[in-house]
Image (spheres, grey):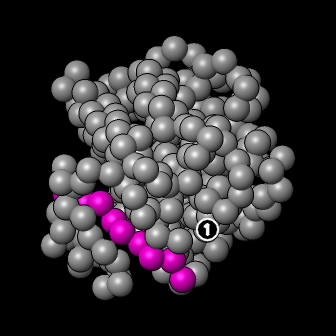
């Protein structure tokens, strides 16, 4: 297939592009910085500098839309929240417009979202049918999904990736945590009772490929079947690194440091991949201890 990817230089995007090339697909990455993308990606990847000079997506078989400013890198000022929204909404709307303008549109749009769609639901078991809690992450993801759904026609199916914390050795959440935990300075955050919906990078990529290759539509929780509490995650990561993990971060200190965005670590979702498993997808990494040992070895 001829596949266009946005966010191709991000954590998931790089791994996905590499796998697509390995399996014989043609890959085009949309980027704002062609020089940076060329250094980060295989030379076989075609690069488009943005989408402004495109009038349609004729000849493209599939689109994977992973673009978006990292949600946890900065405090959520009003300006930063708007940047988080714009970096997702604008490119998604542009892709939808190009798909609609195509005489031979892509057969599938796989578009990013997050389990943040549901907001902080505490102990509630969260499947794709669960009503959300109305907070900023829900508003961000709900509008993102609504825009992407505008591409859905009998010719183009739309799959929405409600992604949890992607575990990988070279970025994402673990990219920030591993240095602290390796020094023995890691531990639970707040009460430690909040749930973490996680997924190994391998399963994330395999899940996207599954959606590309099967006749599926709608939202999918891209998470392991076994979410864990924050305290269990910290203990398991410390065990994988053979380090203590008892340096608890008090909730008040986290709120002071992160402001409103502290909900990302003090809250959580007990999310399950109900629709993905029902479609026949098989996870390689579903036990946290095995996943972390694989990542940190």
Q: Is residue 9 above or below residue 262?
A: below
Left or right: 101 with respect to 18?
left
Going 61% across and 59% down the picture, which residue do you hit? 212
Going 56% across and 46% down the picture, which residue do you hit? 156
Q: Which residues are magenta?
A: 24-32
Q: Quadrant of residue 185?
A: bottom left
Residue named by callout 1:
202
Residue placed furthest toward the top? 134
Going 58% across and 71% down the picture, which residue do you hit? 295
Going 40% across and 49% down the picture, which residue do you hit? 102
| Nearer the observer, 33 or 95 | 95
Quadrant occupied by the C terminus: bottom right
Tell me, yes or no, whether the highlighted magenta stretch contains residue 199: no
Q: At which x and y percent is residue 88?
A: 34, 39
Left or right: 8 with respect to 271?
left
Left or right: 272 with respect to 164?
right
Residue placed furthest toward the front? 103
Q: At which x and y percent is residue 179?
A: 40, 64
Main secondary structure found in the magenta portion: strand
Dot 1 falls on a residue whose secondary structure is helix
């Amino acid at each position: 297939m001829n596949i266009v990817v946005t966010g191709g230089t991000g954590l998931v995007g790089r791994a996905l592009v590499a796998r697509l090339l390995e399996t014989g697909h043609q890959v085009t990455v949309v980027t704002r910085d062609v020089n940076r993308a060329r250094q980060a990606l295989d030379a076989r990847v075609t690069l488009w500098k943005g989408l402004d000079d495109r009038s349609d997506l004729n000849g493209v078989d599939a689109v994977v839309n992973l673009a978006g400013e990292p949600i946890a890198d900065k405090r959520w000022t009003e300006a930063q929240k708007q940047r988080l929204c714009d970096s997702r909404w604008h490119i998604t709307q542009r892709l939808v417009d190009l798909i609609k303008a195509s005489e031979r549109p892509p057969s599938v749009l796989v578009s990013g979202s997050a389990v943040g769609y549901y907001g902080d639901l505490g102990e509630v078991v969260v499947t794709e049918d669960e009503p959300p809690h109305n907070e900023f992450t829900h508003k961000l993801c709900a509008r993102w999904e609504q825009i992407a759904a505008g591409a859905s026609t009998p010719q183009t199916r739309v799959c929405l990736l409600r992604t949890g914390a992607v575990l990988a050795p070279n970025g994402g959440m673990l990219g920030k945590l591993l240095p602290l935990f390796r020094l023995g300075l890691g531990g639970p955050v707040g009460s430690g009772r909040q749930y973490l919906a996680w997924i190994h990078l391998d399963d994330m990529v395999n899940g996207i490929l599954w959606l590309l290759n099967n006749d599926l539509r709608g939202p999918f929780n891209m998470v392991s079947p076994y979410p864990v509490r924050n305290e269990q995650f910290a203990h398991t990561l410390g065990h994988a690194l053979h380090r203590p993990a008892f340096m608890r971060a008090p909730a008040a200190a986290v709120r002071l440091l992160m402001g409103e965005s502290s909900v990302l670590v003090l809250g959580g979702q007990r999310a399950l991949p109900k629709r993905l498993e029902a479609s026949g997808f098989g996870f390689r990494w579903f036990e946290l201890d095995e996943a972390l040992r694989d990542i940190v070895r």
